[in-house]
Amino acid sequence: MLETAYFLISLDRKTPAEVARHVRRVAGVIEAVVTMGEVDIIAVAQADGTRGFPTISTALQQIEGVAKVVTCVVIRP
């Protein structure tokens, strides 16, 4: 089953628009937007089951300028 998660990404003094371009290239990411507030970028990703999300999170953490990634899996009742 196709699952969805939001990834809240905080940066370490890097240009958000530049990092967002790299985030959009990660397999599974369907959207990435630059935000103002506690996080710098919010990415939406889909995977076949929740087991794919750790791989996406790891790929996001390896992008230069990314300081922290928080994963929020969408729960459907």
Image (tube, rainbow, N blue to C red):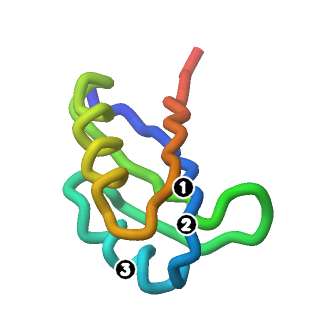
Which disc number belongs to residue 9? 1
> Can you say whether 45 is above or below 4 in the image?
below
Give the mark, 3 or 2, whose residue is nearer the N terminus.
2
Identify the element where label 1 is drawn: strand
The disc placed on residue 21 is 3
Q: What's the residue type where badge 3 is placed?
A: Arg
Q: CA distance from mark 3 to mark 2?
A: 16 Å
Which residue is farthest right? 37
Residue 20 appears at what percent x and percent y?
44, 74
Q: Residues within 10 Å of mark 1 (few under 14, many from 20)?
A: many
Q: Element under label 3?
A: helix
Q: CA distance from mark 1 to mark 3?
A: 13 Å
Q: Which residue is mark 2?
A: 12
At x 33% / y 57%, what residue is drawn? 29
45 w.r.t. 34: above or below: above
Crowd tier of the residue under label 3, counting other residues whose Cα lies within 10 Å: few below 14, some 14–19, many 20 or above: few
Expressed as whole percent of the image width and height from the top left, the position of residue 65 reads 44, 69
Q: Secondary structure at mark 2?
A: loop
Identify which residue, 7 or 3, lies in the foreground: 7
Tell me the distance, in whole angstroms, between the alpha carbons under discs 1 and 2: 10 Å
Up/down of 37 relative to 70, above or below: below
Say which amino acid is labelled 1. Answer: Ile
Residue 1, position in %: x, y? 26, 25
Labels 3 & 2 near each other (Cβ < 8 A) = no
Q: Residue 28, image x and y in percent?
A: 26, 52
Task: Of the two numbered discs 1 and 3 on the same chain, state the one appearing first in sequence.
Answer: 1
Residue in the image at 30% along x and 32% along y: 54
Residue at 59% across / 14% down in the picture?
A: 77
Callouts 1 and 2 close, C-beta under 8 Å: no
